[in-house]
């Protein structure tokens, strides 16, 4: 694998911005494909409903279809004002938080959507900063969003603390959603869902990391089907990597794998972490946004191991990065990357949009995305259902705004995509952490010996700064691919593999393809 060649690739042309592409190649993956340069359009975004998305102090945000009407709604947690739930009605958003009981005014740093009670609608976990007068809340969705009821006390979820990344995940493979919550001022917590109530299993699981955790990512790092955990820790603390042993317990092997980043100063540390197959080799890699140099941990799919890829423009240096998320904004089949930065004393610390060109990243941040100031929460989703993926950015600074950007990729390129709802066997959004692999059944660009593998995605378990959405898995489809094969891997009473063959993705360019998972008896 070549070292990443991250270079500034923007030239100013007489007719606008042009992107200079520098290709890299690999001898054994789909990176050998030579794409038409028209596939690499310069990013083009527009601001959506400026009059609605304009207030400062936003810190975390997450997409989810709380009212089960088929489109994605947006929850935003604030500092200095009440939280908001923006209901999406055919692409028009209205704040209805006060109507449904979600307008908390405590400083909010964490949010996660998940169907914890398995009744078919999305519930909400909200985490605040440390305040002895209040506690985090678990809201139960009543009648598809008619109202949200605080069930924190009855469910044993009424802990106070400086809260960061929450994640609804099925760590034990029993079919229901458990809950992990990261804290900066106390050990992280793991709650097992026993249907009637959550049980705190932090101590017996060995996952109670007492380091100052800000970000966390659950994913199947070693390919055995169950979910492992990477913790991004601040203030000089080393990062952690907890291997799921499959018996309800975890082992921290971060130091053994060399991904703990030792020797950092008290002002440095990891903040946000993103999971994605950035190099299209079939395994899941990590991008770690940090106070200090950012980096990529490239997963070695033949062994449980990672190598550090972190040199070049945009990654090195002290950017005070707080959040990172992968998404294929141009639908070319390669995961691009958005990195948000924040310094409390600097209103205009820039964010970075990196275009992925065959495994190399290039800074392509359009001027519009540099106008909103420093960022915390970043959340990608196709809110308007046109096939390309849009961007919500929460700006924590007093001089910034919370902003929703519409991706203007254009109808032809936007339709080169496939969105998948990965559901359980009863049609519920409960399969966070499942890995979805897309391969080409037919590929006009294929060469003799060229593998059919295109890319992989993981169902969201958290990211974008202390948030977890419930969104479809989004794939961009490279030109020349007509039919696709899908493979879904997840853990429920053991490893499960389900396939879909010869799917014509063009039939689902403007709608979501639903896959119900059927675990092996």
Image (cartoon, rainbow, N blue to C red):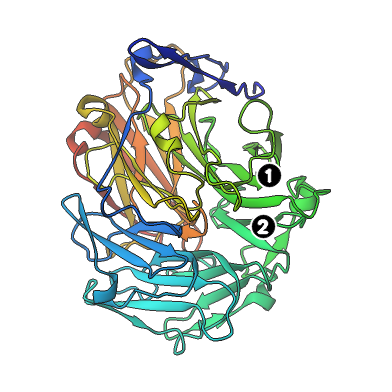
Verify CB contact (< 8 Å) between mark 1 and mark 2: yes
Q: Is residue 366 left or right of residue 309?
A: left
Instruction: Locate residue 103: give its quadrant.
Output: bottom left
Give the SS element for disc 1. Answer: loop
Q: Which residue is mark 2?
A: 243
| Vertical side of 373 occupied by 108: above or below | below
Tell me where residue 289 appears, x and y as whole percent: 61, 45
Residue drawn at 46 percent across, 62 percent down = 492
Question: Can residue 521 be spotted in the picture?
Answer: no
Residue drawn at 26 percent across, 37 percent down = 387
Q: Which residue is mark 1?
A: 304
| Vertical side of 412 occupied by 215: above or below | below
Q: Is residue 402 left or right of residue 59?
A: left
Q: Is residue 309 left or right of residue 14?
A: right
Residue drawn at 31 percent across, 23 percent down = 481
Task: Pick out the residue farthest to the bottom.
Answer: 154
- Disc nearer the start of the sequence (1/2): 2
Depth check: 476 or 53 in front?
53
Tell me where residue 475 appears, x and y as whole percent: 36, 37
């Amino acid at each position: 694998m070549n070292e990443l060649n991250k270079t500034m690739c923007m030239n100013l042309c007489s007719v606008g911005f042009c992107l200079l592409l520098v290709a890299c190649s690999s001898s054994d993956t789909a990176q050998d494909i030579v794409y038409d340069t028209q596939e690499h359009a310069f990013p083009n975004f527009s601001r959506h409903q400026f009059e609605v998305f304009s207030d400062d102090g936003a810190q975390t945000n997450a997409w989810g279809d709380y009212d089960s009407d088929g489109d994605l709604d947006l929850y935003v947690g604030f500092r200095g004002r009440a939280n908001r739930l923006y209901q999406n009605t055919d692409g028009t958003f209205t704040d209805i938080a006060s109507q449904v009981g979600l307008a908390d005014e405590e400083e909010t740093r964490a949010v996660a959507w998940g169907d914890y009670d398995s009744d078919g609608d999305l519930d909400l976990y909200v985490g605040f900063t440390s305040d002895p007068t209040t506690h985090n809340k678990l809201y139960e969705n009543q009648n598809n969003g008619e109202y949200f009821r605080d069930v924190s006390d009855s469910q044993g979820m009424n802990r106070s603390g400086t809260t960061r990344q929450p994640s609804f995940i099925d760590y034990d493979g029993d079919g229901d959603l458990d809950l992990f919550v990261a804290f900066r001022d106390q050990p992280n917590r793991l709650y097992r869902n026993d249907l009637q109530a959550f049980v705190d299993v932090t101590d017996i699981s060995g996952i109670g990391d007492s380091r100052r955790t800000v970000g966390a990512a659950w994913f199947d790092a070693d390919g055995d089907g169950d979910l492992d955990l990477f913790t991004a820790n601040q203030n000089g603390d080393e990062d952690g990597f907890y291997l799921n042993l499959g018996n309800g317990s975890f082992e921290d092997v971060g130091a053994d794998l060399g991904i703990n980043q030792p020797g950092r100063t008290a002002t440095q540390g990891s903040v946000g972490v993103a999971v994605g197959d950035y190099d299209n080799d079939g395994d899941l890699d990590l991008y770690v946004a940090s106070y200090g140099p950012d980096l990529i941990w490239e997963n070695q799919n033949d062994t449980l191991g990672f190598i550090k890829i972190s040199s070049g423009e945009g990654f090195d240096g002290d950017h005070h990065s707080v959040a990172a998320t992968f998404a294929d904004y141009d639908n070319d089949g390669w995961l691009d990357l958005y990195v948000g930065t924040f310094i409390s004393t600097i209103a205009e610390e820039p964010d970075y949009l990196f275009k992925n060109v065959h495994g190399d990243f290039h800074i392509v941040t359009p001027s519009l995305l540099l106008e909103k100031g420093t960022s915390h929460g970043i959340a990608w989703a196709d809110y308007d259902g046109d096939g390309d993926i849009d961007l919500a950015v929460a700006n924590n600074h007093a001089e910034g705004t919370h902003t929703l950007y519409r991706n203007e990729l254009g109808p032809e390129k936007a339709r080169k995509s496939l969105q998948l709802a990965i559901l359980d066997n009863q049609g519920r959004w409960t399969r966070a952490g499942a890995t979805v692999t897309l391969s080409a059944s037919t590929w006009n660009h294929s060469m003799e010996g060229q593998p059919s593998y295109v890319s992989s995605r993981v169902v969201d378990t958290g990211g974008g700064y202390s948030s977890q959405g419930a969104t479809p898995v989004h794939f961009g489809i490279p030109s020349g691919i007509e039919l696709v094969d899908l493979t879904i891997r997840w853990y429920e009473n053991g490893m499960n593999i389900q396939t879909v063959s010869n799917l014509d993705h063009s039939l689902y360019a403007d709608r979501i393809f639903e896959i119900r998972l059927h675990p092996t008896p």
